[in-house]
Image (cartoon, rainbow, N blue to C red):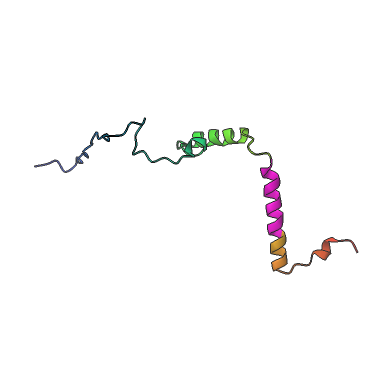
């Protein structure tokens, strides 16, 4: 009679494709841009999250992204104000 408290272990197979000549595991699923992402292989825990956030702050990134972001936000705000029929003349001096 088996012990009901112990779980059965899964079988493992060491299969390698016959005609595969490349390096590494051909069945490993990985996105081609994962090596450039900083958040793709992060470990759990508060310390690791804080250290990755500090490392991200040190990276400057694209210089035009702030300007592009501000232009997009300004256009969206103006579009929203146009949709709700907001009168912008209250900001102008008479």
Q: Let me know if residue 85 is in the magenta part.
A: no
Residue at 68% from the left image edge and 44% from the top image edge:
66
- Which quadrant holds residue 52? top right
- Between residues 55 and 2, which one lies in front from this camera angle? 55
- Which quadrant holds residue 20? top left
Q: Is residue 22 above or below residue 7?
A: above
- Between residues 66 and 84, which one lies in front from this camera angle? 66
Q: Let me know if residue 70 is in the magenta part.
A: yes
In the rendering, at what x and y percent does residue 30 appear? 42, 40
Look at the image and tell me in which quarter the N terminus lies.
top left
In the rendering, at what x and y percent does residue 3 appear? 14, 41
Query: Left of 2 or right of it: where is 20?
Result: right
Q: Which residues are magenta?
A: 64-77
In the rendering, at what x and y percent does residue 86 appear? 75, 67
Look at the image and tell me in which quarter the C terminus lies.
bottom right
- Between residues 18 and 8, which one lies in front from this camera angle? 18
Q: Is residue 35 above or below residue 71?
A: above
Q: Is residue 86 above or below residue 29?
A: below
Instruction: Give the overall secondary structure of the magenta segment.
Output: helix
């Amino acid at each position: 009679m088996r012990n009901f408290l112990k779980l059965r272990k899964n079988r493992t197979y060491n299969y390698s494709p016959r005609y595969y000549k490349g390096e590494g595991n051909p069945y490993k699923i990985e996105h081609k841009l994962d090596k450039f992402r900083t958040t793709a292989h992060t470990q759990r825990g508060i310390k690791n999250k804080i250290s990755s956030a500090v490392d991200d702050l040190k990276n400057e990134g694209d210089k035009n992204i702030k300007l592009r972001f501000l232009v997009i936000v300004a256009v969206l705000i103006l579009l929203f104000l146009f949709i709700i029929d907001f009168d912008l003349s209250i900001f102008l001096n008479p």
